[in-house]
Amino acid sequence: MPNLFTRALALASLAFALCLAARAQAPAPPADDAATTPRAATNAVADAGDAALEAVRRELREQREEIGRLRAAVAEQTRLLNELLARTQQQGAAGAGAAQVREATYSVDGVAVTGALAPSRQQPTQSGGAAAKNPQTEQPPLEDRVRALEAQSKKSGETLSKLGSVTFSGDVRLRYESFYNQLNALTNATNPAIVGNELSTRQRLRVRARLALSGQIGKRFDWGLRFATGTTPDVTGNNQTLTDFYGRKSFALDQVFVSYKPSSVPGLRLQGGKFATPWLFTELTIDNDLAPEGLNETYSRDFTRAGALKNLTLVAWQLPMLERAPGFVLGSDGRLDAEASRRAGRDLALYGAQARARFELTEHAALTVSAADLNFSGTQFITPAQVFGANLQVPVTLTIPATATTPAQVITTTVNIPRDFLINGSTLGVSVGSTNATNRDGRLSSGYNLVDLIGKLEWTGSKRFPVTALLDFVTNTRVRDVVSPTGRVLENHENNGYWAELQVGKARERGDALFGYTFARIERDAVLSPFNYSDIVQSTDVRAHRFLASYTVDPRVTLSFTAVVSERPNGLLGVFGATPAGSLDRPTVRLQFDTLFRF
């Protein structure tokens, strides 16, 4: 006990000594501030505490505002996620059962937020009963899923025309069209020694509308349908003129086809129905709006190895044009004329094949060459009016006798002869719908087997103004001499056609511009006239210049202007007619202003 007391006393003494030593070393404050030092220290501590408290409050307010913004962003992302998930589930998860959206708490920048998440698949359990993780079915982070679904939503918005496996597309074109310097081939009203009368200028508004549907059946079959405006007999145009006292415009089946691509032969496609022309062509031989019917086979192979050849394509086609009932024609002696009956019942068809190759000459230059044979079978046995005419209009004059109350009346009108009547064996001997040479019996003078050679050079060195140059030459190997109405045989050398085309620019994106020029020279029997370019003054025995300019206002809206100047190099009566000297022969000008809307 004394020992403990002694130790405590010693410690107290040591502490007292230390306090005295520290006081002696510290500088003494000034005499006039000695009384205010404790109060100033207290105020400084209070001010510092208030400042620190205010800073903490400000930081808390900023954190609350940031948390509010994060929660609003997460709520918007959650809404978008649920909306997109519902859409994808309806399209891709039909039949798998209705999925349940679950609530979950997750962290965004350290803030706990509760929201709806995508339904997760039930994971298989391990032997211990715990759910096993499957990396293939585990949900990715929310932000990644939202970004992916936003991209899918944008793509879906751009392709709203797709419904399930069916895709919709089409276009509407509004056209203002005018004609100048049109002539007829009748005796001149002022000078009967010549032919040709100038017709009044023609102005008209036209519209074209097309709606296409396409889809797949399994992995190997494709199908397509297209409906379009246009009159049924006009196979080279889908335009409807705004006329006929606001009558309704026809809208008919323009294409229908099924394609098959066998897996055993990659690159092979078999197609049947009514389809777009499957081979490389120009309007020298086939109009762009023509949709042939029948069968076609295409084999295409790409080459990736070193070398200029990059693609080789082979195409064949079998296209029936006209199926006719069996003919039964009696001769002048009252007996069956077998040859005339055979001709009357002869079916017409187009058979052919094409080989084309694409070469990459340089990084920015490519050359495509093709050779095709188009064999029109049976055309030498027909009258053009039977096959290519529409409803033939024949003028008729009717006299209504006088009655007790009205005088006699003379009425001139027209009678329509249906095309079916013309096809089924009628031999009216009237040539309509064709500018090819005909014999005195009204039948085509020549057969038509066309050898068509095309070369196309493409240069893409300029991204905005690529250049395409094309040459097309066609010759008819079945041309025959012409028998005139007087029985005279006229030599026929009108079997060649030429087409040269140059284009600069493109028409794909907003602001694109395209300029083009085309020259065509088509001799009388170079091609079968009802099927080629229909915007020139006549399909054959013609020389034409076409000028084109277009501007892309929007990827789906294009403005264009086309001018076609057509000339008759052999006069109004043609190469086999005797056109009197001094007859009128002026170039016909056709102007077209188009606004095209695509969807």
Image (tube, rainbow, N blue to C red):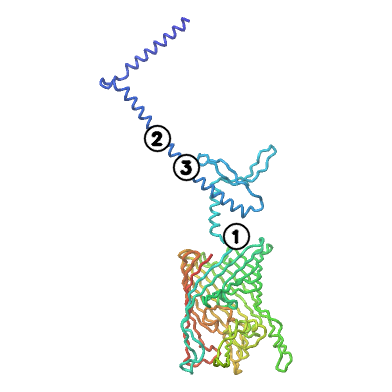
Kind of residue at badge 1:
Leu
Residue 251 visible to the viewer: yes
Q: Given the current orientation, which residue lies at the most extreme right position?
A: 335
Q: Nearer the viewer, residue 158 or 531?
A: 158
Are discs 3 and 1 less than 8 Å apart at CB? no
Circle 3 residues within 10 Å: few <14, some 14–19, many ≥20: few
Indicate which disc, 1 or 2, sits on the residue closer to the N terminus.
2
- Check disc 1 and report the residue beneath it: 163
Q: Nearer the viewer, residue 397 or 401?
A: 401
| Residue 249 at x, y percent in the picture | 56, 74
Q: Nearer the viewer, mark 2 or mark 3?
A: 3
Secondary structure of the residue carrying numbered label 1 = strand
Secondary structure of the residue carrying numbered label 3 = helix
Kind of residue at badge 2:
Ala
- Check disc 3 and report the residue beneath it: 68
Kind of residue at badge 3:
Gly
Q: Which mark is residue 195?
A: none
Circle 2 residues within 10 Å: few <14, some 14–19, many ≥20: few
| Residue 67 at x, y percent in the picture | 47, 41
Q: Given the current orientation, which residue lies at the most extreme front position?
A: 404
| Residue 558 at x, y percent in the picture | 48, 68
C-alpha distance separating marks 2 and 3: 20 Å
Are discs 1 and 2 less than 8 Å apart at CB? no
Residue 360 vertical position relative to residue 76 in the rendered view, above or below:
below
Are discs 2 and 3 less than 8 Å apart at CB? no
Q: Which mark is residue 55?
A: 2
